[in-house]
Image: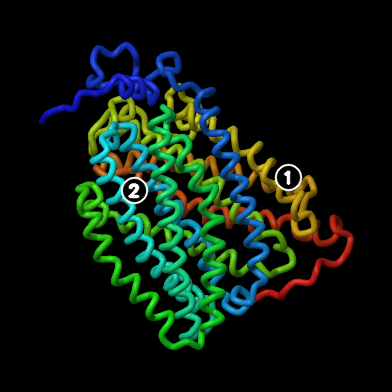
Amino acid sequence: METRQRRPEELGLLQALGAGSGLESPRAVPTPPGPELSRETAWSIGIQVTLPFLFAGLGLSGAGILLHYFQHWPVFTEMKDLLTLVPPLVGLKGNLEMTLASRLSTAANTGQIDDPREQYRVVSSNLALVQVQAAVVGLLAAVAALLLGLASGQGLDVVEAQVLCASSILTASLAACALGTLMVCIVVGARKLGVNPDNIATPIAASLGDLITLSLLAVVSSFFYRHRDSQYLMPLVCVGFAALTPACVLIAKQNPPVVRILKFGWFPIILAMLVSSLGGLILNKTLYWPQFRGMAIFAPIMCGVGGNLVAIQTSRISTYLHLWSTPGVLPLWMKKCWPNPCSTFCSSELSATSARVLLLLVVPGHLAFFSVVSLLESQSVPSDGTFVLLYLLAGLVQVVVLLHLADVAVRLAWRQALDPDDHCIPCLTGLGDLLGTGLLALCFLAHGPLWAGARLGGPLDPAPGPP
């Protein structure tokens, strides 16, 4: 098989992603790179990741404030299943947009989009794929929310089911179109500027994904709720998007790797949607209880930070494997030691260096986002030292678990000849939603009596009772 000649800047990037400079040939099997042999140090990783991460956190903080505001809209108070829909629908940025960003970053780092014609083919097929996935997963997320509502004792209303399905499909498709286009611009721009898109694309997807998706969901669902007496509006929306799907499939089929995802890539995003829906059920059942006041604000931040950081790490390891190995075959140094928490964070490998950098961002990042929320919504959130410590501990536990699982999951996927960009990121971000929501609920449970009594020193503001 003919081997493509690597460009000089690609050879430099190979070293930045972990190649040793002492190799005789770039096609030689590399040994695990030491810090002294890598151009990409902890400092350079931190510089590239920190600013997008902080920008992402501000977007997540804004999404939390929006959700706190939206939860009192009539459509959210009357249709309880809509709250169950929030984490899986917002989590589509992890299932779709972050996965798209990771695929495009890998394509950029391997030189696949340097040629304009090839760039157009790769970009158009990937955007079409995301539209197909968004329509299908949006519908399945609505069905899952309805089924979870039935399992928890809520009745099924046909009109409510129509509003939920139409809102989910339209929101998922519009958000996928907007965020997918943004990811393309970021990855192509980063490639031209010589910046590793693995470090910046997924944080920016996280920064705007929650804001855009939540806003669209609130506006679209309110529109359908006001017109719920219309007999044909919502079925027509669902049928219309179903009719557009074959055209998107035809566009996606012009790229063979995308065809493989169309055939075999549904399991991870559907599994991630189901796991996120369990987090949505926790949010649904806790949001209106007084001791969980502030849950709506912190849930997008907690879930988003964990998903953001694990997506960066997964994307980086995946890019390394695409450059230095073939699917189904792990590099020799990866075979020698199966990952454990110590090797994930404490070894001299470049993946451990990036894991340490990402873990060090958790506490200062959460403190910064917490300060922003406390400044803007001081009456709606607990801000005493006990809650802050519980909150930071929950954030650390979430990210430690996710980064270690990323190390394990990428290796397992690669050994099975599966692309980690498509099979690991959705599952890990979905698990991040469930872990984040569950750990956050435990924080409020542990802190609730103290906040409601001693800290506020008075009755809570009026709020709807529990569902």
- Residue at the front extreme of this rendering: 116
Q: Residue at x 33, y 35 (%)?
A: 108
Q: How is the image coloured?
A: rainbow
- Which corner quadrant holds the N terminus? top left
Helix, strand or loop at label 1? It is helix
Residue type at mark 1? Ser
Please indicate whether residue 206 sits to the left or right of residue 371 in the image: left
- Give x and y (percent) for residue 399: 54, 42
- Which corner quadrant holds the C terminus? bottom right
- Residue at the left extreme of this rendering: 1
Helix, strand or loop at label 2? It is helix
Q: Pointers 2 and 1 in contact (CB under 8 A)?
A: no
Q: Where residue 244 is drawn, which disc sits there?
A: none
Q: Residue at x 37, y 23 (%)?
A: 18
Which residue, given by chain and number where applicable, does mark 1 sit on?
371
Which residue, given by chain and number where applicable, does mark 2 sit on?
422
Number of numbered markers: 2
Residue 47, compared with residue 37, is above or below; it is below
- Give x and y (percent) for residue 68: 67, 62
